[in-house]
Image (spheres, rainbow, N blue to C red):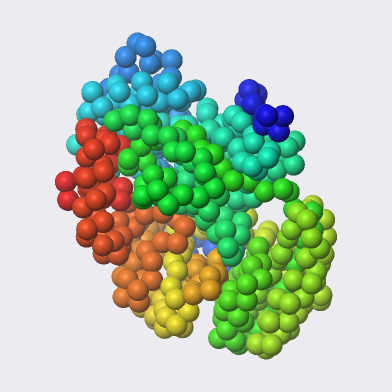
Amino acid sequence: MADRTSLSHGADIAPARSWWGWGDPGQALPDAECAELAALVPGAAGTAQPVPSIASLELPPVRVSAPRTLAHLVSRDPADRAGHTYGKAFRDVVRALHGDLAAAPDLVAFPREERDVVDLLDWAAASDVAVIPYGAGSSVVGGIEYRAGTHSGVLSMDLSGMGRVLEVDRVSRSARIQAGALGPCLEAQLRPHGLTLRHFPQSFAFSTLGGWLATRAGGHYATLHTHIDDLTAALRVVTPAGVSESLRLPGSGAGPSPDRLFLGSEGTLGIITEAWMRLQDRPVHTASASVVFDRFPAAVDAVRAVAQSGLYPANCRLLDPGEAALSGVAGGGRSVLVLGVESAHHPVDGRLAELVALARDHGGSPVGGSTAAGDSAARDSAAEAWRSAFLRMPYIRDGLARMSVISETFETACTWDRFPELYEAVHRDVGAAVRAATGAKALINCRFTHVYPDGPAPYFTVIAPGRRGSEVAMWDAIKAAAMHTLGEHRATVTHHHAVGRDHRPGYDRQRPEPFALALRAAKQALDPAGILNPGVLFDAAG
């Protein structure tokens, strides 16, 4: 078929990534800026925790060796081991800063093709070596940290060497893509075809397609196609029991979906190596607007009206007064709603006007006027200020961590009728837990990342001064309180950050027990040696 193209070129070189913190090491905050930030948090430490050098780290001894036939795929270099020890949660960053890398993998593997993955899994299963699938290490829930403690060794399997777009079907607007493709590399390979996956999580530059699929990541769209699930047509997964490849179809009612078994399985049932993904024409028409509200409950009602209108904005981010102030978008106790619409085919000004009118009907005041533009033009000022703060926030979190300031984020989803009570409970109960753990009052902010006709996905940020050396224990206490509060109010333990190991207690309470039995049975059938990411989602025996 003329409109189907096979691609043989490799992916772009992956960007440099910090071994201890978020993203680009060149973007990390200098000591002086860390101190300036901490000055805004009463009780914070006065000096920045130094970042240890790789050479100064005391890594545990390597316990296993790969066979000669696999040696070219495997590294025991300290930098590789250190960089693959933890994800990017607050507790991960703090432990790295303190030089605590007791959980470092023995080996890091860099497969280049699916056959390598098969061979590595065969060796690991026969040698009782745990295998932790690794995309780009941006997990914030303990998803890539080995904690089981019983295997003879640990292998981190880094899929970043498998990052090509293998085939493009322009007629069906889909592509077959290797799981190790980083977001920017994936989009760069689709761009010449005029297509886009249009999945842009905050971790876009430092996460992979396989990671998005394995964690059911949330992306660009605030409504309609909110998760990577919605863009997935078929999966190819290597398991210790064999290779699973589903049939690419627009839809099917043939029994339970095989893709749904592996989407969100977090590397516990198999390693995703390829996926057929549904694509879109690149947007040409875009428009955005920001609306300010004096009362947060009125803003919530406005967002509910938008979510139930059938207008499906691409962006619908509501910032409560604290979040709006922290982001520099608005002050004076006001909330801000950022709206955006886009289309590859039709002008969108009319749809944006309808959305703004809905917000105005609920007491909102548009800021300045909307911005309608091409794909690369500027957004309205409030939207741009929010976007800049959004992308910078992980680096700020790392800077605060160096000053022993506790910074925790957790996201959830609940029905509209439950949100007001949940919002109050988080401020009350998590705030009390922060005071008990740190002796200080917490700053607790909230934004909506995604919205649905039946409920929002609130994302909470908690900031408080910690005590140097006790940051992890304090964070653990706050995380436990947050998970308890979510469960008490029938909100999900996670909307898009995955379960990992940090959310296991809440997930165990949320998950129906018959489903847990089915998951354990699937684990036993697909991974009988129990080597794949042990401790995530469930324990094989109970």
364 relative to 514, above or below: below
Name the residue located 42 percent from the left edge and 80 percent from the top edge.
418
Q: Can residue 63 be seen in this view?
A: no
Q: Which quadrant of the figure has residue 370?
A: bottom right
408 relative to 351, above or below: above
Q: Number of numbered discs present? A: 0
Q: Which quadrant of the figure has residue 287?
A: bottom right
Q: Left of 110 or right of it: where is 469?
A: left
Name the residue located 73 percent from the left edge and 60 percent from the top edge.
342
417 relative to 174, above or below: below
Name the residue located 64 percent from the left edge and 50 percent from the top edge.
198
Q: Can residue 389 be seen in this view?
A: yes
Q: Nearer the viewer, residue 382 or 247?
A: 247
Q: Position of residue 408 (x, y in %)?
A: 44, 62
Q: Position of residue 140 (x, y in %)?
A: 44, 52
Name the residue located 52 percent from the left edge and 29 percent from the top edge.
162
Q: Where is residue 512 in the image (x, y as percent from the top left)?
A: 26, 62
Q: Position of residue 319 (x, y in %)?
A: 60, 73
From the image, which quarter does the N terminus lie in? Answer: top right
Q: Nearer the viewer, residue 506 or 31?
A: 506
Q: Which of 435 and 540 is in front in this view?
A: 540
Q: Left of 112 or right of it: where is 388?
A: right
What is the residue that sits farthest to the top in this orientation? 68
